[in-house]
Image (spheres, grey):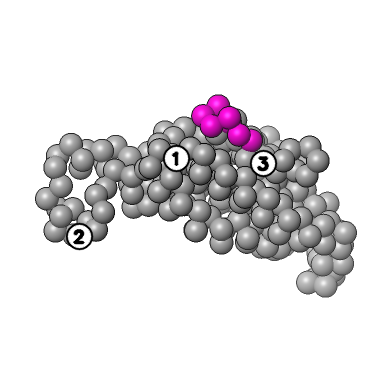
Amino acid sequence: VQTCALPILPANLQLNDFINLPREMFLKIIKLGIPLSLASSTQFLNGRITLMFTGVYLSPFEVGLYYTIQKITKIITLPLQSINSIAAPKFAESYGRDNSTEIIQTSRYISKIMFYSSFPIFLIIIIFSFFILEFLNKDYATAYLPLIIYAAGQFFDSISGAVGNILKMTNSHIAFQNISIIMLLLSIFLSFLLIPPYGLLGASLVASIHLVLWNILSIYIVWKKYGIITIYIPVFIK
C-alpha cells in the first residue's frame, strides 16, 4: 500500500506529517488501501487453498509430495519475485508523472528478462522431472506429470511479466482486487471438482489453471488500458 500511494503522497513525508494529513488525502489513502488489503488477503488464500484441499482429500504422503512439487516449481518464478520488488516503485513513479511510455517500456523490458531467465529453468524441470523427483525420494518419481503441469503454470506466470504490479501501481487496484476474488472462488470450485477424483494430478491442474487464468485476465486489463501485451514469447509476441 505504501508503494502504491507514492503518486498521491508529497515527497519527504514524515510520520508527524502523515498524522496531520488533510482529510481528503487521508480518505484517498484509505480508499486505495482497502482494495489492496483485500486483494493481498485473497492472494494469500489463493496460494494455500489447493494445499488445504489436498490435506482433506489426499494421503499424508501425497500432501508431502504436492508440497515438494510446489517448492521445486517456485524456482521458476524466483527471477520474477526479485524483479517485482524493484519494478513496483518504478511503475508507481512513472504513473505519478503520467508517463505511460515509460510504463510500457519498463513492462516490455521486464517481460523479456523474465522469459530468458525462467525458460532454461522450466526446460530443465520438464526434461529431468522424473530424475529430480527420484533424486529426492524414489517413491516420488511417479509424480513427474503433476510436476510438469505445475511447472507449466509457474512458467506462464513468470513470462507474463510484472502484470500484477502494473495493476496495483497504476490505479487499477480495484481490478486487481476483483481478479483476486474471482480466482479464489474459482480455485475453491476447481478443487472440489478435480482433487477428489484425480488426486495429486487434479491439485496440480487446479494450481496451473489458477495461475494461467489469473494472468490472462490481468494481461487483458493492462492491454485495454495501455495497448500492450505484457507476456513475451519470442517470434510470436514481442
Q: CA distance from mark 2 to mark 1?
A: 26 Å
Give left or right: position of 181 versus 212.
Answer: left
Furthest residue in direction top, as rendered: 224
Question: What is the quadrant of residue 205 in the picture?
Answer: top right
Who's the residue at 87% across and 67% down the image?
Answer: 131
Of the image marks 2 and 3, the number of the one nearer the N terminus: 2
Residue 224 on the magenta span: yes
Who's the residue at 79% across and 37% down the image?
Answer: 236
Q: Which residue is mark 2?
A: 14
The residue under label 1 is which amino acid type? Asn
Measuring from the top left, give residue 182's x and y in whole percent: 53, 32
- In the image, residue 166 sits, relative to residue 80, either above or below, namely above
Q: Which residue is mark 3?
A: 231
**SS type, badge 3:** loop
Magenta residues span: 223-229
Question: What is the quadrant of residue 12 in the picture?
Answer: bottom left
Who's the residue at 67% across and 41% down the image?
Answer: 231
Q: What label sits on residue 99 in the rendered view?
A: 1
Who's the residue at 62% across and 50% down the image?
Answer: 109
Q: Are marks 1 and 3 in contact (CB under 8 Å)?
A: no
